[in-house]
Structures are given as structure tokens and as C-alpha cells.
């Protein structure tokens, strides 16, 4: 037993080294840079204490990006989980072509978020966009789908949700197939209908899968970057930018590496503050079977 534990420990060492090297060290470096005024390439850094953090709370663009990030996070999480759960419940039944439907629903996740954004841009663009061409066939004039920041944010949320819904579907399918059939059979023998069976049998036993899907999607939504770059470029007038995109713009375009690092630390704290309580609350709801 001791030899087996030692073997398992040795197998985790390479992964632990990679995590430390590519996650914890850059995180500590960003936290350190957040206390400096630095342009990102000069050898000179000026210590300014917490000025970058205090500046963030008076930055209107920071607040707009924060609101967008919360919409991307919670909106994408809700849509992905609801659609993924309904798809999993449907595909957990036996019918002809079930595997083909699973493949079709999962396929979007196989495309990179940047490429997906590029594809959807040509669907939503004003001149010659696919949706406008369809509307023209019915005599409807072109629609400026991304006329303002809020509509752009909503469209990006829908696109991201559609792309990653397949991930939730797979997680929920695994959870559904792991529920013993005897619980459903016992509920039916007691006269339970489909709705009662879902609320009191399926849903409680699906909490582990829900926990995994919700936390994963929340983190992914809060970090959204690629699809925004390719669909709107942060526009119109930078009104659809997320905090991740804002960090990239500050660092590489505005040459404000210290301020960008401070925003990055705030984003990291935001993810921790939201996802840890959500994870803990869902864990408490889990039942043994």
C-alpha cells in the first residue's frame, strides 16, 4: 500500500510542476506588478502602493467591463446548463439517430472560440450577413444586430452558450447514466409522475454533475475573451469588452502593465469569491446513493 501511494505521488509531480510553473508563478508575478507603474517593457518600475487598485474603482470602463463580465459569466452559465440538461434528458432516451444528435450538439465545442466568433460574425454582420439575407427574402430590411453594447453582449452570451452547451450535455449524460434505475422504478411504483420523478429523484442525484457543470461554466464565462475579440473586437465603442479583454488592451495597447495586472488580480479575486461559495453550497446539496 505504501509503495502504491509513493507511486501515485511520483506520478503527480510532473503535473504539480507544470501547475506551479504556468499558474502560480505568473499569478504571483502579476500580484507583484500590480503595485507598480510599468509600461510592460522598460527596466524602470515605479512603486505606487495600491494606487492601481484605487484607480480601478473610479474607472468607468472598468465598471462597464465588470458588468459585462458578470453577464457573460452568469448568463452563459445559466443558458449552458439549462440547454445542456434538457439535451441530456432528451438524449438519455433510446431512439433512432441518438448518437448522431449527440455528435451534432457536441460538435461546436470542437471549434476554437476565436474561430466560432469569426463564423458568427458573418451571420450577424450588417452588410451581407446570413441572418439579414434571410430577412431580406421575407421583405424585411437589414437589422444592425450589434448596434449598441448591450445587444452585442447578449449576442456574445448566446453564441458562447450555444458553443459550450455540448460540454454540459456530456456531463449531465454521465450523471444521468450513473443514477441507479431502481430509484426511478420505486418512484413509479409509488405512483409518481414524470415531473415528481425529476424533481425528487433525478435532480437531487444529479447534484454532483450540476456542481461540476456550474462551476466550470462560471469560470469559463468570467474569463471570456476569444469570442469577443473575433465577433465585436470589444465594440461598439469598447462597450462589449470583458475584464479579460480589458486587461489585454491595457497591457499590450495602452502599455499600462501595472494597472492591467491590478485588474487581473481583481478578476481572480472575483472568480474565487463567487465560485467557491457556489461550489460549497452545491456540495452541501449532494446526496449519497
Image (cartoon, rainbow, N blue to C red):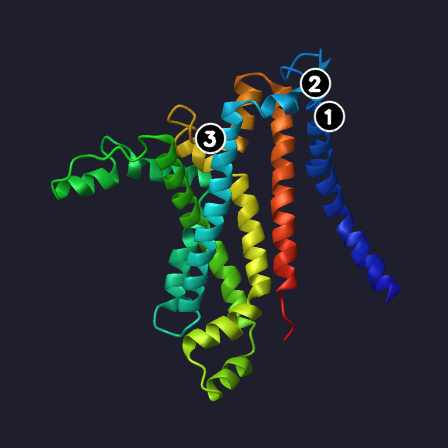
The location of residue 208, given as percent across then percent down, is 60, 63
Position of the C terminus by quadrant:
bottom right
SS of the residue under disc 2: strand
CA separation in Å, label 1 and label 3: 25 Å
Identity of the residue furthest to the front in this view: 58
Read off the residue under disc 2. 36
Residue at 64 percent across and 23 percent down: it is 54
Quarter of the image with the N terminus in it: bottom right
Which of the 4 image quadrants contains residue 94? bottom left
- Residue 65 position within the rendered picture, expressed as x and y whole percent measured from the top left: 50, 31
In the displayed structure, 124 sits above or below 274; it is: above
Relative side of 29 to 125, left or right: right
Tell which of 8 and 195 is nearer to you.
195
- Evaluate if marks 1 and 2 touch, with contact meaning CB atoms under 8 Å apart: yes
**In this orientation, which residue lies closer to the viewer: 143 or 17?**
143
Q: Mark 1 = which residue?
A: 32
Amino acid at each position: 500500500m505504501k509503495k502504491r501511494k509513493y507511486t501515485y505521488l511520483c506520478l503527480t509531480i510532473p503535473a504539480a510542476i507544470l501547475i506551479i510553473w504556468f499558474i502560480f508563478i505568473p499569478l504571483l508575478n502579476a500580484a507583484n506588478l500590480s503595485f507598480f507603474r510599468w509600461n510592460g517593457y522598460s527596466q524602470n518600475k515605479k512603486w505606487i502602493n495600491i494606487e492601481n487598485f484605487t484607480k480601478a474603482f473610479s474607472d468607468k470602463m472598468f465598471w462597464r467591463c465588470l458588468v459585462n463580465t458578470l453577464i457573460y459569466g452568469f448568463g452563459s452559465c445559466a443558458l449552458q446548463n439549462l440547454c445542456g440538461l434538457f439535451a441530456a434528458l432528451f438524449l438519455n432516451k433510446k431512439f433512432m439517430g441518438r448518437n448522431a444528435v449527440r455528435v451534432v450538439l457536441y460538435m461546436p465545442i470542437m471549434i476554437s472560440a476565436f474561430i466560432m466568433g469569426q463564423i458568427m460574425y458573418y451571420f450577424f454582420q450588417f452588410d451581407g450577413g446570413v441572418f439579414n439575407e434571410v430577412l431580406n427574402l421575407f421583405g424585411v430590411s437589414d437589422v444592425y444586430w450589434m448596434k449598441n453594447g448591450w445587444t452585442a453582449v447578449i449576442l456574445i452570451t448566446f453564441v458562447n452558450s450555444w458553443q459550450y452547451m455540448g460540454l454540459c450535455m456530456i456531463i449531465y449524460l454521465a450523471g444521468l447514466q450513473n443514477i441507479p434505475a431502481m430509484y426511478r422504478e420505486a418512484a413509479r411504483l409509488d405512483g409518481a409522475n414524470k415531473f415528481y420523478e425529476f424533481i425528487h429523484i433525478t435532480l437531487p442525484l444529479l447534484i454532483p454533475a450540476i456542481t461540476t457543470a456550474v462551476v466550470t461554466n462560471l469560470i469559463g464565462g468570467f474569463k471570456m475573451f476569444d469570442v469577443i475579440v473575433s465577433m465585436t473586437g470589444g465594440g461598439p465603442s469598447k462597450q462589449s469588452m470583458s475584464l479579460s479583454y480589458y486587461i489585454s488592451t491595457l497591457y499590450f495597447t495602452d502599455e499600462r502593465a501595472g494597472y492591467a495586472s491590478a485588474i487581473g488580480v481583481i478578476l481572480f479575486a472575483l472568480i474565487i469569491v463567487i465560485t467557491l461559495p457556489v461550489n460549497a453550497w452545491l456540495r452541501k446539496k449532494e446526496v449519497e446513493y
